[in-house]
Image (spheres, rainbow, N blue to C red):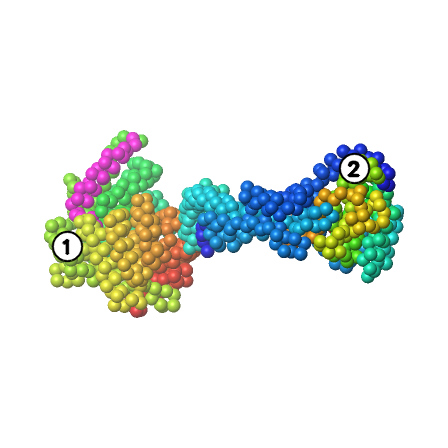
Amino acid sequence: MSVRFVSRPLDASRRRFLAGLGGVAAALALGLPTPPAQAFDPDRLRQSMQRLYGQGGLRVLEEWFALLERLRGEEISVQLREVNDFFNRRVRWVDDINNWGSEDHWATPLETMGQGQGDCEDYSIAKYVTLKQLGVPGERLRMIYVRARIGRSQITQAHMVLGYYSTPDAEPLVLDNILPSITPASQRSDLDPLFSFNSDGLWAGGSTQSRADPLARLSRWRGVIERMQSQGFT
Amino acid sequence: MSLIKQLWLAIVTVLLVSFVGSLLVSISTSRSYIEQEVRIKNEDNATALALSMSQLDKDPVTLELLIAAQFDTGYYRQIVLRDPQGEVLIERSAPSYEGDVPRWFRQLVHFDVPEGSATIQDGWRQFGTLTLASQHSFAYAALWRSMLELAAWFALAGLLSLLLAWVLVRGIKKPLDRVVTQARDIGARRFTTSEEPKTLELRQLAQAMNTLSADVHHMLSQEGEKLDALRRHLQHDRITGALNREAFMGRLTAALTSDDVRASGVMAMVRVSQLEKLNQQLGHNATDALLKALASRLESLGKQWHVPLVGRLNGSDFAVMAPAAESPELLAKELTTLLQTLAADTHPQPTESPSEHSERPRLLAAVMPYASDDERGTLLATLDDALAEAESSVHTSVVVRDREYHSLFHTHAEWREALDAALAKGPQLAFFPVVDATGQIVHYECPARLELEQAWQSAGVFLPWVTRLGIEPALDMAVVKKALAELALTPTRTLGLNLSIASITSARFVNELRALLEATPLAQNLCFEVPAALDAQAVASLRSLSHALRPLGCQLGIEHVGAEFTRLADLHDMGLAYLKVDSSLIRRLDASSEQQAIVRGMATLCHSLGIQVIAEGVTTEAELTAAFQAGADGATGPGVRELH
């Protein structure tokens, strides 16, 4: 996975990444609602999965349900590790243009699981959503834009990882798909953080939680959230 | 609620609803648009600022400068930087701009825009959270101004549409009122016609009602004609068209005993001398033509005073009654000319035997005045005697018998003076009851009495002079005033007053009468009666009188209806309350099934128009019974007076 990642032309990838940044930034402040213990509708998720990806997708979804069931109430370190492993194992890295036919498509966890492949942000989103489903407080999770150096070379790549902050001013743990094990950020000298966001503070006003919100379509981050809602995450 | 009111209400409601609706829609659209824009601005600016701060050294001065630069050059209400624990590191805020927007409007609109927030990254750690709120007070001012503009536009548009609506409603209201009036008229069995409105639905309605009225008019004309034919058959001579002897005698008696203008005048008797011989000379047809011409010319005699009455007493004798005619000499003169021209016009045919000397027909006449309470028999005998004199005389063909005429005054001037004085003093009223079938009094007929020569004289005495002097309106007005005075004493009575044709055709009289009656609630206790001898002008006057008096509650009736029933059709839209059948049709009603048929026909006809029928001149109880059996609703006359 990481090999293929490295082989991609760097400047194109970065451009694409930065282009998405504006939209993401706008959506960032909107955030995601902090989901309750089980903030999804299993039957609707199954229906969506069946409709979109058939039996193969359903199998992965059932495994995901089992994972959630198994990890509920476990220690946070276990939860982080298991979730990180789950997606790193089941999802094959692929460029968006090959996967979705468009640059920088942000997939919902369901789409990522159904496809069995995804881009770096698809990993991060899927892990983020899954951990929130397990009851991890939203403010501890942040998606971080990083500049990744591949190996010992000077070649850098635009990348995204999920950071776990035990406290707001703590050093985060990094959940990455290039390096499958979870490590403290300070040990990841190959990654250079630039900016982070999550869904906290979104709908803080409380009045704009509406699927018909015309702004949703204008922002990539909000677009994913809306698609998730239509697929059965509530 | 009236249709017009509803229409107005609908128009105003539509205007208000569209105004308030578009105002609300406009405000709420603008409001949500502004909210979205400000929200996007908050979020994007917060992110952009946080993004650039993330890339810098976290030197407090640099950060403060960055925030100050953003705050000072942009449009912000507040920018705050907090550390991860929530402690405020840097804060910039400005008061919100109030402007000239009323407080209630701010409270009504109330923008609800969340602040934008973004986290500043310092390496892997979070340095702090930036929250940012844009200045949006300007939006209140913009909204307020646009609402004022909208209101002004709507006021203008509303004014224009109200103006338009006013024209429209007026265009509907007028014809609608006409149609409603007509419908109400028809409901009250006044079959009026109305001008057809332009509005389609109203036009159809008006057309339908006009058709109905026309049908009723047609039906009435036909029925009237049938009745008239029946009456002609009964009362008129078949050859000459004049009244037959019996009918003429009846009318004469009625006139002599009547209390009106017919009670005095001049009578004439005309004889076609040696009719048998003439018949042989001229032949039947020519003789009949002569008689017919004579009868029709006699009918024009004394017409300047009153409608004359012509009757054929026997084969050769005609009688003419010219009520209110002034002097027998005048009539005699007129008659002489008439007879001469007629005789001259008649050319005897050349006979087969030349030995026989053919002559022009000899036409003779006798003239004498009559007055109320004269004996009919004496009158006719005197005239007969005078005719005999004329027959024996060679030179004169017209003899005048100016009998010792008991007249109160002798000249116009004397009469005028006396009548003026009497009117100034005021008339008295007689009260003759009109009863219905149960004996209840419907109203009182109130002929006037005037004091002349220290005695109260009946109308028959002075009315011809009142007519001649043309002071009928003055008399009628005095009578109305007297009647109102009487009613003030006994307000339960209903009084019937006579109005002359001269009065109702006088616009001044009608206006005066209306003004008088409008001032008193007693008007509804008055009935006004007009003689049946109505020409086209009088019919029109009667119609406008009816129009003027109906709202006041007065009833309107026609008296002495004895002929020309076809006229009834013209009265169908008048709203008459009753019609009095002339005594000539009532006299000996019990004995004549034909008369009964006529009265019954009239009653049916009138009832279909909501008009009551009253029999005049009832003398006996048998006549009274017969009248009610024939369908009359009331009766009056000497017989009734005796009973009450």
B251 above or below B68? below
Q: What kind of residue is marked 1?
A: Asp
Q: Is residue B537 left or right of residue B463?
A: right
Per the model, the C-alpha gap separating discs 2 and 1 is 135 Å
The answer to whether B441 appears left or right of B193 in the picture is left
Residue B329 within the magenta-colored segment of the rendering: yes
Near mark 1 (Cα within 10 A), the count class, few <14, some 14-19 or many ≥20, is some
Front disc: 2 or 1: 2
Q: Which residues are magenta?
A: B324-350
To which residue does mark 1 refer? B420
Q: Image quarter for residue B485?
A: bottom left
Q: Chain of mark 2?
A: A
Which element type, helix, strand or loop, lies under badge 1? Answer: helix
| Residue in front for this viewpoint, B239 or B488 | B488
> Residue drawn 53% across and 51% down?
B109
Q: Nearer the viewer, residue A232 or B163?
A: A232
The amino acid on which the numbered mark 2 sits, given as a three-letter code, is Thr
Please state the total of marks drawn on the protein image: 2
